[in-house]
Image (tube, rainbow, N blue to C red):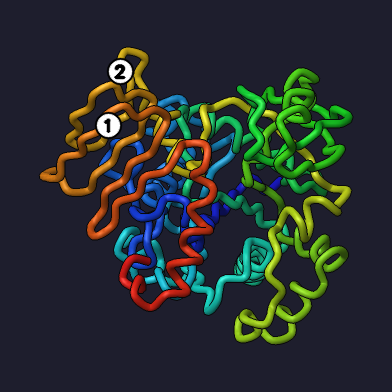
Amino acid sequence: MNTLLFPVILAGGKGERFWPLSRKDRPKQFLSLDGSSRSLLQATADRLIDLGGDESSAARGFPSAGDWRTRTGWDSLWVITSSQIAEGVRQQLPKLPSQNLLIESEGRDTAAAVAWTSLEIKQRYGEDAVIGFFPADHWIADQKAFAHTLSAATQLAASTEAIVTLGIKPTFPSTGYGYIEQGEKIGSFNELPAYHVNRFTEKPNRETAETFLSSGRFSWNSGMFVFRAGVVLKELHAHAPEIIEPLEQHGADIYPQLPKKSIDYALMEKTTLAYVLPVEFGWDDLGDWNAIERLLKKEETPNVELATHVGLDTQGAIIYASNPEDVVVTIGLEDVVIVRDRNVTLVVKKDRTQEIKQILKTLQSDPRFTDLL
């Protein structure tokens, strides 16, 4: 059984909801948002190349080589990104082999990215190659538990015609995440139970999310997938031929003409081969500024302050300034996000950060604001 995993980082996103810190020349995946010195992209690469089954890994409690392994660190890692930020990816990951970096001429969402990368890995390593896809903007708390989970997912994908998704055990009734309902249990892998997927549900309302949470049958959709190259390509032929067939016939030159679809919509909601591993390793998708509070908020402090802040009667605020010499002064504010970066100051209520994308559309339509994007 082939238990060799090829991890792929999806690094083409813009991270618009972290504007103004995230911009065209510095997208979210190039930022450090958890107080560390490593960017989100670098942190993702770090944990994926550290999954090898050598003695040093075993000593740290990671799976042994007899259980599963990546190839040799950087040799196994792939990244797919956009042409606009490809040079930045090279600078952030100088050890990444050039042949393992796929550059999209135009972003076409995750279905096209998964299809192209899976084709490339199949051509190089065969249809039984096990591939894992991982967004570049996730935060993982427990590396040992993460490695243990990927061992299970790799074993399941290698032994079964399966498209394995990692389902995060929900901790609150989120309306911002997609949900996965687990069906029949099919067995255990690396001591983790695996279930057939009954259905995917996109971003439910509050009442539905509360029902999902209380049932105990639902997981958050993490957007992390593991499968054999041949299995996913066969399923793409069945459910998304408009994406896979042009790629097979014309190669990457056809990329800008492919339909723009997510892998969830194009494949996961349609395939009968979807399986879920409900897991717990401390996870956040860092979707907007509120994620900073989830990561860094301390009970004894009223605000999350990544800036020099002087406040009066201010609580529940997230305050960020990229220039340490800038001082942010607040009076009588509650539940707001304040971000000062270069030539922009953003002030928004925490429950409306999703609307930052709407503001960006307004800025994009006015030539006066080109340098703010």
Mark yes or no: residue 6 visible: yes
Residue 176: image location, x then y, percent: 63, 39
Pick the front one: 329 or 227: 329
Q: Which residue is mark 2?
A: 301
Tell me which corner region of the image, top left, top right, bottom left or bottom right, holds residue 324: top left
| Residue at the image position 42 percent from the left and 50 percent from the top | 18
Total labels: the figure holds 2
Q: Secondary structure at mark 1?
A: strand
In the rendered structure, the answer to whether residue 74 lies left or right of residue 65 reads: left
- Figure quadrant of the C terminus: bottom left
Give amino acid for label 1: Glu
Residue 149: image location, x then y, percent: 60, 32
Give amino acid for label 2: Thr
What separation in Å lies between label 1 and label 2 (alpha carbons)? 9 Å
Residue 272: image location, x then y, percent: 88, 48
Q: Which residue is mark 1?
A: 305
Tell me which corner region of the image, top left, top right, bottom left or bottom right, holds residue 262: bottom right
| Residue at the image position 69 percent from the left and 25 percent from the top | 192
